[in-house]
Image (cartoon, rainbow, N blue to C red):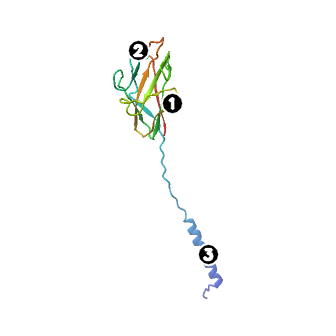
């Protein structure tokens, strides 16, 4: 006896074959992709070369600077961006143990100024330092530098004739 496939049996067979294919295709359709991600930590740092100024001994109301010329010490300073992103440099002064940092010289008051216009030896533009940060340079690239000079004026009168530390701080912040 021959097996006959009826019309309804053929339909059932086709449905089973299609269902099997769909189930098989569905289980083989999974795939993956990958994202390669990198990151670098931001490093904000500054150094100052040579980082030390000795103005020597000055008379009362005396003035000296790190620029070239008579009475000056020829010791410009260079701030370097040692970080890995563009930085802005800020600068501030400080009072000493005996003298107050001020805009002008006075009794127990001294001034400390900075010049960063690039022509400080020829035509300096002096800005009085304060105890708050002021802009020294902006958008200094990694490994970039900013040269600057300093000028000091000792008090017009004082009872303190010992060496004073007139410190200057350079700060780096992200640009």
Q: Pick the residue in front: 46 or 152.
A: 152
In percent of width and height, residue 30 lies at: 55, 62
Task: Describe residue 120's horizontal placement relative to residue 105 as left or right.
Answer: left
Q: In the rendered view, would you say 35 is above or below 16? A: above
CB contact under 8 Å: marks 2 and 3: no
Front residue (pair 144, 109): 109
Left or right relative to 21: residue 42: left
Label 1 belongs to which residue?
133
Position of residue 22 measured from the top left corner of the image (x, y, whole percent)? 59, 71
Q: Residue at coordinates 34% horizontally, 24% vertically from top-left?
A: 69
Q: Is residue 147 left or right of residue 174?
A: left
Does 142 appear above or below 28? above
Instruction: Kindly indicate whether the residue at mark 1 contacts the one at mark 3 (C-beta within 8 angstroms).
Output: no
Foreground tag (2 vs 3): 2
**Quarter of the image with the N terminus in it:** bottom right
Residue beneath label 3, please?
16
Secondary element under disc 3, as helix, strand or loop, is helix
Quarter of the rendering containing residue 144:
top left
Q: Earlier in the sequence, mark 2 or mark 3?
A: 3
Number of the label disc, if any, that sits on residue 103? none
Could you tell me how far apart the alpha carbons at marks 2 and 3 are, in whole angstroms? 108 Å
**Dots 2, 1 in contact, CB < 8 A:** no
Residue 35: give x, y in percent of width and height.
50, 54
Q: Residues within 10 Å of mark 3 (few under 14, many from 20)?
A: few
Residue lying farthest to the top in this orientation: 159
Residue 11 drawn at (x, y percent): 63, 80
Q: Secondary structure at mark 1?
A: loop
The CA distance from mark 2 to mark 1 is 29 Å
Please give the residue where the numbered disc 2 appears in the rendered image. Answer: 59
Crowd band around label 2 with a 10 angstrom C-alpha radius: few (<14), some (14–19), many (20+): few
Write the residue at 57% across / 65% down.
27
Numbered disc in front, either 2 or 1: 2
């Amino acid at each position: 006896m021959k097996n006959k496939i009826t019309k309804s049996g053929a339909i059932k067979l086709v449905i089973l074959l299609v269902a099997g294919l769909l189930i098989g295709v569905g289980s083989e359709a999974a795939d993956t992709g990958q994202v390669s991600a990198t990151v670098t930590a931001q490093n904000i740092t500054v150094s100052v070369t040579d980082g030390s100024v000795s103005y020597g001994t000055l008379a009362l109301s005396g003035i000296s600077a790190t620029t070239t010329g008579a009475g000056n010490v020829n010791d410009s300073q260079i701030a370097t961006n040692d970080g890995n992103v563009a930085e802005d440099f800020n600068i501030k002064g400080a009072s000493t143990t005996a003298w107050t940092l001020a805009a002008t010289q006075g009794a127990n008051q001294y001034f400390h100024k900075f010049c960063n216009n690039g022509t400080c030896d020829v035509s300096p533009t002096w800005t009085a330092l304060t105890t708050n940060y002021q802009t020294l340079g902006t958008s200094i690239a990694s490994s970039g530098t900013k040269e600057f000079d300093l000028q000091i004026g000792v008090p017009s009168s004082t009872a303190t004739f010992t060496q004073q530390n007139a410190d200057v701080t350079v700060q780096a912040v992200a640009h």
